[in-house]
Amino acid sequence: MALMRAAVFVEPGRIVLDEKPIPDIGPLDALIRITTTTICGTDVHILKGEYPVAKGLTIGHEPVGVIEKLGSAVSGFHEGQRVIAGAITPSGHSNACLCGYHSQDGADTKHGWKPAGGWKFGNTIDGCQAEFVCVPDAMVNLSPVPEGLTDEQVLMCPDIMSTGFVGAENGDIRIGDSVVVFAQGPIGLCATAGAKLRGATMIIAVDAIGERMAVSRMLGADFIIDFKKADPVEEIMRITDGRGVDVAIEALGTQATFEAALRVLRPGGTLSSLGVYSTDLRIPLGAFVAGLGDHKIVTALCPGGKERMRRLMDVIASGRVDLTPLITHRYKLDDIENAYDLFSHQREGVLKVAITP
């Protein structure tokens, strides 16, 4: 039995490099040899035991690689082809998919639907922090990497670029809009870039880490508020002359940022939520204007599927966005435990870590 190296969840607090069998594939699947992957904030939630997964599961959901083997029923691709797959790998035929919500794939007609069921890598099936990964429903999920693009140029597409951009898309940002993005981690930075692409002409970013604020300005932020030096709500209302913003994107997942995002909306504004919340949220009466402010609150999970990946890689190929500055550290798969230690403790100004087997 051929073996590969993989980052495996053992128990809360322990993800270790181990050996596992190279995955078998079914008729509709593809075996991908991973050339570059990365660690996500969600992986840290798994590491800490805040998000439950099965012991022994291979972690990771951001694959760039080469087709090693194709299932017997897969057409339109060839072995040796460079591809990516989204963090979300929909089947394409569930009730959720047919309603246009591929991220929520996996409807169960007897027991309702499983939230976030489209997220399978490193959640319900073995993931990408390994030498090989099995991509389910390959014809729905594989997308060829355009000629001339490097692994690192497309590494953000499977997850954080798709997630950040949908935050801007769900906000229905229009040309001339004012937008605030709370938190400039990798997803918040992608939301900032997405707001710029959508036509926002005033983009306000909120953070307190110097390196992140510098990248934020490069990706399109016009104003940057250091929340350790000033009250973001007061500053945003001052910058907008008391009008408030058209769209507030919450990209951290805390009560404080969610509430602040509500408080800075103009009448009829939209709160686009990208945060992963680990406790119950409370909606204060005043911030919610007692439910009478004509506000919208929308949520999203990273869109996946090959068409989404194609669009994102086309944005990269066009030169309109360069997300390679988000890659601040590089590790070999052999050293992934040290990479987790760095990333989970947010040392050395880390944003994203490129992992190469």
Image (spheres, helix red, strand yellow):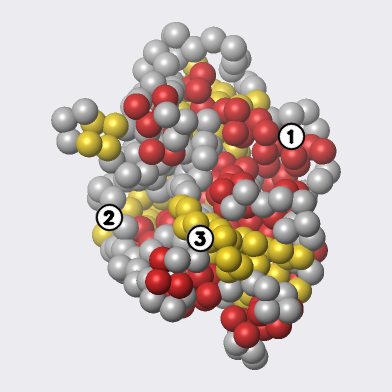
Left-right relation of 198 to 252: right
Image quadrant assignment for residue 19:
top left
SS class, disc 2: loop
Q: Residue at x 45, y 9 (%)?
A: 73
Q: Residue at x 61, y 34 (%)?
A: 309
Q: Which of labels 1 and 3 is toward the front?
A: 3
Q: Mark 3 points at which residue?
A: 294
Q: In which quarter of the image is the N terminus?
A: top left
Q: Name the residue under label 1.
A: 314
SS class, disc 1: helix
> Is disc 2 surrounded by few (<14), some (14 to 19) or many (20+) residues within 10 Å?
few
Q: Mark 2 points at which residue?
A: 52
* For residue 15, above or below residue 286: above
- The foreground one among 310 and 287 is 287
Q: Where is residue 211 in the image (x, y as percent from the top left)?
A: 70, 74
- The foreground one among 105 and 20 is 105
Q: Which amino acid does label 3 sit on?
A: Asp
- The foreground one among 286 and 43 is 286
Q: Position of residue 36 (x, y in %)?
A: 60, 43
Q: Are marks 2 and 1 in contact (CB under 8 Å)?
A: no
* For residue 112, above or below residue 80: below
Image quadrant assignment for residue 232:
bottom right
Q: Distance between the residues labelled 1 and 3?
A: 36 Å
SS class, disc 3: loop
